[in-house]
Every structure is written in structure tokens, then in C-alpha cells.
Amino acid sequence: MKRSTELESLDSSVIHPETIRSMYTEFLKCLSLNSRNLLSTGPQCHGPSSKFLRPVQIQPIALSSDKTPLLHLKRNVGSSWVYSSKLTTLYLDALTEMASAGITFEHKNTLLTGVG
């Protein structure tokens, strides 16, 4: 509406430079809005799949009962710590599930409590 009001107030023989500048500025704004709309209609690829590695199926390896895996959990029994196959299995299954889903801790700081 502003443009039509400006055009009506203009004398047909005289066009002020300030009016031309303001019309040109509005024209450029309209062009930039149209170009942004055209660019935003394309597919967006910012989903979670672009942030993680693709999942890889990992088959768990069965260990014999007399072997303790390198990464294992112990529970406190009385005044000593005893290897717990149940807790270790739960923990390793959770790690396997995370690896299968593509979750990675690469280049991230993590806090493991109760280790060592």
C-alpha cells in the first residue's frame, strides 16, 4: 500500500531521487525474500542420521563361564569386590545396542564413575 500512495502523490513530471531510492530498496527486499523462499523449498538434511555413523550389525560373542572379559563389572560383597557376570552382560549388551544404533562418543568427553 505504501508504494501506491507514493505513486499517487508524485507529480508525473517530477520524481524525487529519495522516492526512487526507497522504491529500489523495497524492490531488492522483495527479491531477497523470493530467493530465500525458493532456496528453502529443497530437502533438508539436518536430521539425526547425518550426525551419527550408520548402524552396523554386531554379533555378540559367547564367552565360557570361566573367562572374565577385559571390560567387566564387579559388585561389592561384604568387604570385597566380586566379578558379576549378570551386570557385565547387561553393560556389554547396552554397549552393543548403542553401537548397532550408530551412537558414538568419538570426539566427546564422557564421565565414567566408579572406574579404577
Image (cartoon, rainbow, N blue to C red):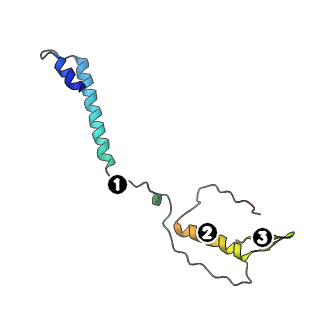
Dot 1 falls on a residue whose secondary structure is loop
**Residue drawn at (27%, 36%), measured in percent from left and top?**
31
| Of the two numbered discs 3 and 1 in the rendering, the one whose residue sits closer to the viewer | 3
Is label 3 in contact with label 2 (beta carbons under 8 Å)? no
- Residue 23 shows in this picture: yes
Q: Quadrant of residue 5?
A: top left
User: Which of pointers 3 and 1 lies earlier in the amino acid sequence?
Assistant: 1
Q: Which residue is mark 2?
A: 95
Which residue lies most toward the left here?
Answer: 13
Q: CA distance from mark 3 to mark 1?
A: 51 Å
Q: CA distance from mark 3 to mark 2?
A: 19 Å
Disc tally is 3
Q: In the picture provided, is 12 more to the left or to the right than 93?
A: left
- Residue 69 shows in this picture: no
Q: Compared to 71, does 47 lie above or below? A: above
Name the residue type under label 3: Arg
Q: Which residue is mark 1?
A: 43
